[in-house]
Amino acid sequence: MAKRISWMSVTAGEMIRFRYKGKHKDAKSRIRTCLVLNERHLFQRKTDGKRVRLVHMLQMEAIPRKTGTTKLRTAQIKRILGRAANLGLEYRTEGEEKRIAVKGTRHRAPRQYRRLVNVIKQHGVYRTFSWHRLKRRAAFRAADYPWPQELVEELKGDAPINEADAEMEARDDPSVSGIKSAQEALDKMKKGEDSATLDAKFDELIDKGKL
C-alpha cells in the first residue's frame, strides 16, 4: 500500500504520486507520478510582485492521459531517468521505510535541467506545480515505481541514507556550523562547494528566515 506523506517531507530525487488539476480551461484532474527535481523554487511574479513557491518535476505518468499523448515506453523511461540520475540512485530511510531515490538535492536542479533539456523537448515531461495548491492535496511515495534495473543494480551494497541522521550531521559539521545566513551558504555553493551538509544548512537557515 502506498504511504501517504506530508508535502513538507518531499525532497528532490523522490518519485511521488498525487492528484492535481491545472489552471487552464480544459484541464482535468489527473493522478500524476513524478520525479521531484526542485521542491523549493521561490519565484517573484512579475504581474503582482508576489513571491510564490514552485515545485519542479518530471512527470513520468498521468492518469487519465492527455488526449494525443502516449504512455512512455520502457526505453524512454530508461533514457529520461538515466539522464536525471547522473549521480546514480541511492536508498533513503525514514524509520523502518527504505526507498529508492535519485542522488542529489534541489540545488543541483539547474545542472540536471541542462542534462535533460533534449529529452524534455522530445517527451514533454517537465512540469512546474504551485506549492500552494499541492500542499492541499494528498501525496504518496511511489514505492512501486519500476526503476530501470540497470540503475538499481548499481545500488547493491550501498548503505541507506538516514535523512534524520544527515540533518543532525549537518548541524554538527564544523565546515558549515559557522554559516549564519542562507546567502552565505549560497555563496559557497556558487564557488563550487557541494555537499549534503551544506544543502541541509541552507534549508535550515531558509526555514528560520535567516536570509
Image (tube, rainbow, N blue to C red):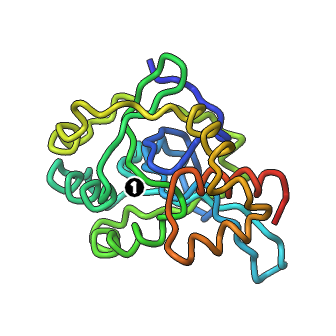
Residue furthest bottom as drawn:
46
The quarter of the displayed image where residue 76 is located: bottom left
Q: How many marks?
A: 1
Residue drawn at x 56%, y 38% is 166
Q: Residue furthest front?
A: 174
Q: Residues within 10 Å of mark 1 (few under 14, many from 20)?
A: few
Is 103 placed above or below 7 here? below
The amino acid on which the numbered mark 1 sits, given as a three-letter code, is Lys
Residue displayed at 55% across by 46% down: 11
Q: Residue at x 45, y 43 (%)?
A: 14
Q: Nearer the viewer, residue 46 or 177?
A: 177
Residue 59 found in image quarter: bottom left
Image point 81% across, 66% down: which residue? Answer: 211
Q: Give the image location of residue 73, x and y in percent.
A: 18, 51
Asked if residue 132 lies left or right of residue 190, the reply is right
| Secondary structure of the residue carrying numbered label 1 | loop
When the figure is inspected, residue 33 is found, relative to residue 142, above or below; the finding is below
Q: Nearer the viewer, residue 20 or 14?
A: 14
Does residue 53 appear left or right of residue 73 in this picture? right
Image coordinates of residue 205 in percent, x first then y, are: 76, 55
**On the rendered structure, is 15 left or right of 54?**
left
Q: How far from the left and from the top, in percent, is residue 102?
A: 38, 48
Q: Nearer the viewer, residue 54 or 68?
A: 54
Residue 203: image location, x then y, percent: 68, 53
* Relative side of 206 to 117, left or right: right
Q: Quadrant of residue 167?
A: top right
Q: Which quadrant would the N terminus be assigned to in this image?
A: top left
Residue of label 1: 66
